[in-house]
Image (spheres, rainbow, N blue to C red):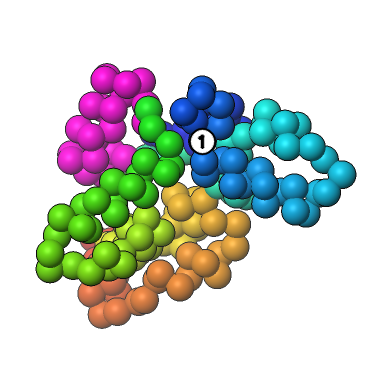
Amino acid sequence: MIQIPTQENCTKGRDGGICGYCRQAVKQRLDHNPNTDFQSFAERYWLPKTEAASRTVPYHFSYRVRVAVELLLDEHSGWPYSFSTLQRRLETALKLSPELSNDATSLHGLRATAASYHAGRGLDLPALRAMFGWEDITTARQYLNVDGAMTRRALDSIHQ
């Protein structure tokens, strides 16, 4: 299980301080809280967007995912890079794939693909909501397109 905390100090910036992603989030918070200084928010970053985003995410369902997560844990004790690094790596991969345009996908698009995949495999709304950390069940509902195959799997699971 991957535990996403309610708060964790970000030290993934170049100087050991907060990374660019957290710095941008702090600046956005300052726009809504003009009587607060940058450092008081920066000391509390990283924060998930919502309370529901703090969660435990299982990854036992896929051998490939297990191997990748365990490698990160063994080699680095977790993901050693910033969110910006993920974005740069995706951009590099897209540039190296001549058949795809540079805007063919995004990290958010890959997350949506994972949500659609799990919904298509039959993960129900509450579990989908918990896995992806959505506060509102309607967000999960948009990934759940019930089709004949899903109906068949659901019927098979309750009538076996």
Which element is circle 1 on? Answer: loop
Which residue sits at x=67%, y=52%?
28
On whether residue 153 falls in the magenta region, the answer is: no
Quadrant, the C terminus? bottom left
Position of residue 91 measured from the top left corner of the image (x, y, whole percent): 29, 54
Q: Which residues are magenta?
A: 59-79
Which residue sits at x=28%, y=32%?
69
Which residue sits at x=40%, y=69%?
143
Is 95 in front, or is 56? 95
Q: Is residue 111 visible?
A: no
Is 43 in front, or is 62? 43
Which residue sits at x=60%, y=57%?
135
On whether residue 68 falls in the magenta region, the answer is: yes
Kind of residue sitting beneath label 1:
Cys
- Label the magenta part by its dominant secondary structure: helix
Relative to 126, does residue 14 appear above or below in the rendering?
Answer: above
Is 94 left or right of 49, judged from the image as shown?
A: left
Relative to 95, does residue 153 appear above or below in the rendering?
Answer: below
Please identify the quarter of the rendering in which residue 65 is found. Answer: top left
Position of residue 100 measured from the top left corner of the image (x, y, whole percent): 18, 67
Q: Furthest-front residue in view? A: 15
Position of residue 97 measured from the top left corner of the image (x, y, whole percent): 14, 60
Is 65 in front, or is 103? 103
Quadrant, the N terminus? top left
Q: Dot 1 corresponds to which residue? A: 19
